[in-house]
Image (tube, helix red, strand yellow):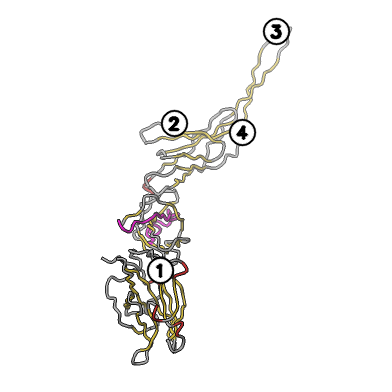
Amino acid sequence: MRAMLTMAVAALAATGCYDEVLYVDDAPPAPTGLFYELQPTGDPLRPRGVLLRWDASADPNVALYRVYSRSSSASAFGLRGSTTSPSFHDDGQPHLEYYVTAESDGGAESDPSASVVVDERLRLQAPASLTSVSLDGRIHLGWSDNAYQNDPNGFSHYRVYATSYDLDNNRCGASWTLDGTTVAPAFLDGALTNGVPRCFGVSAVSIEGFESLWSPLRYDTPRPEARNLIIFTATVDPARNGFRFFFDANGDGRAGPLELGIVGAGGAMDFSLSRDAGNNLILVPQRAAAELRLYSSQPIADLTTIDIAPATGFGRAALAATPQLGYVFQMNEGDGFYRYGAIRVTAVGADYVIFDWSYQTDPGNPELIRMRR
């Protein structure tokens, strides 16, 4: 808006008289709708910065906005910066309180907007627990949804962090990365390398961008698996009578991708399919390095139920092949480490067994591997 001031200036008769008109800018209206959003970093006490936004002014003569802030309630407000857009990014540790003014192209400044206080009391609870499931090239993470349940109107999303894991020293790495965000209390971390341990943590973020403390840390290791393999009794198909989890052709303690999940003749395999005196199909340990135990006497819903190998109970005795039961195999290759594989029997026919299998390629890893001591 513009106001017109008229000044009557008397002049000599020789020069005549005239009116001189001066235009002076009125101050624009104060900005409205100011809000903020913190930018989390993984450290709830050190956000990357704060992003301020407000409603764009309808006054066509607004040239810029000025952002004022103060670091404490006892401090005076000072100019933090200027911008021509209705947003402002304050990098680093944010101040306590902010407000915004609008300035016309003539230099007239509006009244302050309503201020916003960066109130850390709006921070959500940390997820109370974190669990995981080992998969082939993936890790499924799940956690308690208490952050959302305790403040559904203030909840925005979860952030999932990951780093390396040192199995020997039982320690997570120092270089964390953000693997993803989700609004659900679950996350599938994919494209991982089998046999390489990972450490995970999860935080909750409020609608203002406040990041919670992290959940308890959890480590897990992806491992190869396959579904619906079939082996037969030797009388039906001797060439497909047994199964071997891996064959270490290089002798380096790690199976190559072409050396996993071998179906073949029983004698060279980890186990074979045979019959007992009652004509029931049984799983028989074959190689001297392989031992077997039942994972549980109760049916298991899926192969992923067998997440960590039992510490004891392995032997050379054959076990009945029973649908929906899980079995764990312990292989001692003579290098000081046990390696573990697992199967879940899905179906038992007249002369065959169908099963799912998994195997951990990382020696010394408790995710289906335990180090011999």
Foreground tag (1 vs 3): 1
Identify whether 288 is placed above or below 164: below
Classify 10 Å Cα crowding around label 2: few (below 14), some (14-19), many (20 and above). few
Disc 4 from disc 2: Cα separation? 24 Å
Tell me if mark 1 has few (under 14), some (14-19) or many (20+) residues whose alpha carbon lies within 10 angstroms of its own.
Answer: few
In the image, what residue type sits under mark 1? Asp
Which of the image's four quarters has the C terminus? bottom left
Which of 146/362 is in front?
Answer: 362
Location of mark 1 (residue): 248
Which residue is depicted at the point 63% across and 22% down? 5
Q: CA distance from mark 3 to mark 2?
A: 51 Å
Q: Nearer the viewer, mark 3 or mark 2?
A: 2
- Residue 165 is covered by the magenta coloring: yes
Q: Amino acid at mark 4?
A: Asn
Which residue carries the number 4 mark?
Answer: 61
User: What segment carries the magenta color?
Assistant: 143-169
Residue identified by numbered label 3: 12
Circle 2 sits on which residue?
A: 78
Lower sequence index among marks 1 and 3: 3
Q: Disc 3 and disc 4: Cα gap in Å?
A: 39 Å
Mark 4 residue crowding within 10 angstroms, few (<14) / some (14–19) / many (20+): some
Amino acid at the residue labelled 2: Gly
Circle 1 sits in a helix, a strand or a loop, which is it?
A: loop
Question: Which amino acid, by three-letter code, is at mark 3?
Answer: Leu
Q: Position of residue 164 (x, y in %)?
A: 38, 55
Decide which of tag 4 and tag 2 comes sooner along the chain: 4
Q: Nearer the viewer, residue 185 or 116?
A: 185
